[in-house]
Amino acid sequence: MIRGHGRSVGGRNRGGRAALVLAGMVAAATCPAQTIVDPGQGPVALPRGTTGAAELSGITHLGGQRYLAVGDNGAKAIWTLDIAVDGTTGRITTASVSGSIAAPGLGSDSEGIAYRATTDSIFVADEVASAIGQFDATGAALAPVAVPAIYAPANVRGNFGLEALAWGAGSLWTANEEALSPDGPLSTTTAGTWVRIQRFSQSLTADGQWAYRTDPISALSSLTTAERSGVVDVLPWNATTLLVLEREFGGAIPGFRSRLYGVDLTTGSDVSAVGALATGSFTPLAKTLLWERSFSALAPSNFEGMSFGPDLADGRRSILLISDDGGGTRQDLYALVAVPEPPAMVLVVAALAALPVARALARRRRSVRDGRTGDGRGA
């Protein structure tokens, strides 16, 4: 949240406090979210039962307790999940992989999944092919999404291609994990990497692209050479704001750190026509840190996907993260809660209510300055 700061000298700044309150309310309207609340549950094991579901890297909500997930191990299956969320706390009460949908058209590296309710269609991002496939509810392949040429496999560094996928606010969204070859270097300990966040319209045509800078790697380790810091998923809060999930693998004793940022698309320029972000001829997205957590190297959780869950009883929105269990990590879920922004009309009413107070305080300040009391008589 943006907060106003004023300095009071001898009590003479009180007249501006209402104006600061008003400015703060207006500023709050532009924040991606007021806050992300961690209910304190921590990682929750996601049992696979006899399904064989593994290396899950993307999750999407169908409604109620039903979710879909995909794994990046080449399985030709879309996994069905049953997850119950407490309607008051946002905590996960039960979770399991309940079955699968055969999808022969899936590629070798399914990283993200999105569901579009109005057409009952499922989208899956494949990192190796740098493609977005489309499937019906039975797993049959439909027409794929036409991905901009900048994402062509020739521009994708190994295992850093299309990782994120979400449907929301009437659009499909994706992003690569770390910089495409024309866009500059991969993440280091001194600088993050450039990522392109891509939007597709309801007709699935590319209609907007923005540059996003990840955080640097916190530290390198002598125990591995696999350090990284990139974008693993995005989630549309509304038509102009996104939640962005960054995943870092690094540290002297290497482990995973997840960070959730809010971004406002109006803060950055469209880079659809920018052939190389390395040129710097654009305005990047501003981002606000909303939540972060490091996970133990002894029992690591590698969270790669996220989805909104059901709304809670008080109007807050539940969020679920899902962890890829490849390489000895855990297959987990993680519950968070998003506190919605105040509706625009509430802000307007509050702002109007504050105006008489601001005017009265301003009159009082002028009266003191002019040597009059509050009733207009001389002091």
Image (cartoon, rainbow, N blue to C red):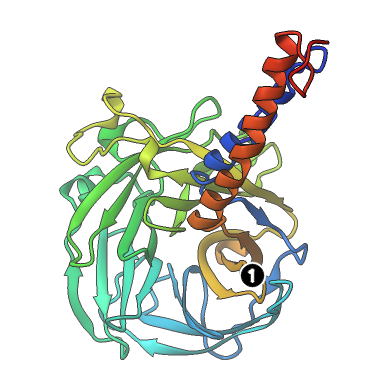
| Location of residue 298 with respect to 52 vertically, above or below | above
Q: Residue furthest front?
A: 377
Asked which quadrant contains residue 137, the reply is: bottom left
Q: Classify 10 Å Cα crowding around label 1: few (below 14), some (14-19), many (20 and above).
A: many
| Location of residue 126 with respect to 139 vertically, above or below | above
What is the x, y in percent for residue 211?
35, 38
Asked which quadrant contains residue 319, the reply is: bottom right
In the figure, is residue 343 to the left or right of 174?
right
Q: What residue is rendered at 34% in x and 56% in y?
A: 174
What is the x, y in percent for residue 193?
43, 35
**Residue 369 or 199: which is nearer the viewer?**
369
Q: Is residue 248 visible?
A: no
| Location of residue 65 with respect to 309 vertically, above or below | below
Asked which quadrant contains residue 356, the reply is: top right
Q: What residue is rendered at 26% in x and 39% in y?
A: 270
**Residue 235 or 80: which is nearer the viewer?**
235
Name the amino acid type tagged 1: Asp
Kindly state the secondary structure of the residue where label 1 is placed.
Answer: strand
| Location of residue 193 with respect to 39 vertically, above or below | above
**Quarter the N terminus occupies:** top right
Residue on which disc 1 sits: 332
What is the x, y in percent for residue 206?
20, 55
What is the x, y in percent for residue 364?
72, 23
In the figure, is residue 210 to the left or right of 324?
left
Q: What residue is rendered at 51% in x and 46% in y?
A: 29
